Amino acid sequence: MLSSHQVKKIHVAIIIVTYNSEKYISKCIYAILGNFSHKYDYEIIIVDNHSGDKTAQIIEKIRKKNQSIITSVYNEKNLGFAKAINIALKTRNFTDYYLLINPDTVVDCFSISNLIQCAEKSKSGVIGGSTYDNKNIQNGSYFRFPNLCIGIFDFTNLRKLIRTDYWHKYFYYQDSDFSKLAYFPVDVVTGGFMMISKKTINKIGYLDERFFMYLEDVDYCMRAKKQGIKVIHCNLSKTFHYGGGSSNNKDRIRHSAWLISRKLFYLKHFNPLSNILIQPIFLLDDLFILLNIFLR
């Protein structure tokens, strides 16, 4: 038992899913290690989705020097993002928070501790930080729940045919300015830099494994909000995102995963009448995308 002078440290399990991430994973891990604070208990769980490059060797080289805080799991095939995350989630029942971080990111100093502090102050169950690209522009850190118009005019190539970009800007909250706030409520935070409390996992469960890649974060935040769980974005937590660190075959893996995920999301969350409208549009867009890939 803890004495009256002892306070249990907040424990955070940091989860990274890798797939052919050899170009990024060492920078990602070392940046996380540099964020460790004596105020909190950290550990890193890396789940590799059967990488075909040197990702596993790099992970093991770093892990051997940090065996007390890094755990590695190697899948025999690519199980997708959601399922790999769930494998890690199910291995740690004692933690207070799970932090999902993409392998192609580099967190700023104090990013993780700032995220924890925002979560504690806001009493939120899901919280995300800001991700920036190589031009120092924030790129898709938080967004609104998709509606039918977003599905039609932003999730398909119809966006390229329409001069206005209204629904894209609406989806990414580009019609709002939250820059002066430390943290604020949003519909969704990106799964590439998302912290989930253990209480949230206990209440709504794990990620939906039917989403191989894409929209699993939107689905999870929607489930959380329906159960009255706060979803918060923290401006004080930042990470640099290279992009492209989860696949070395963008056309085959990314395009097919996206086509499946957008259909699944609308089938799951929208009524039959809405799906009668949007699913044929998705099908036509599928054919357009696949034809373009074939003709390259």
Image (tube, rainbow, N blue to C red):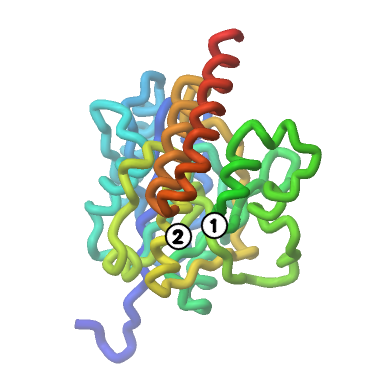
Q: Residue 212: image x %, image y %?
A: 37, 37
Residue drawn 50% across and 47% down? 192
Front-lying residue, 287 or 33: 287
Residue at 45% in and 60% down: 221
The quarter of the picture where the C terminus appears is: top right
Give the percent coordinates (x, y) of residue 170: 69, 55
Residue 17 is tagged as none
Binning the other alpha carbons within 10 Å of mark 2 as few (below 14), some (14 to 19) or many (20 upward) gives: many
Which residue of the protein is positioned furthest toward the right in this rendering? 163
The correct choice, above or below, for 38 with respect to 188 in the image is below
The answer to whether the residue labelled 2 contacts the one labelled 1, judged by CB atoms less than 8 Å apart, is yes
**Nearest to N terminus: mark 2 or mark 1:** 1
Image vertical order of residue 185 relative to residue 284, above or below: below
Residue 29 visible somewhere in the drawing: no
| Above or below, comparing residue 291 to residue 281 in the picture | above
Q: Which residue is mark 1?
A: 145
Q: CA distance from mark 2 to mark 1?
A: 9 Å
- Name the secondary structure under disc 2: helix
Q: Is residue 73 left or right of residue 247?
A: left
Of residue 198 and residue 263, the one placed in the foreground of this image is: 263
Q: Amino acid at mark 2?
A: Cys
Mark identifier at residue 221: 2
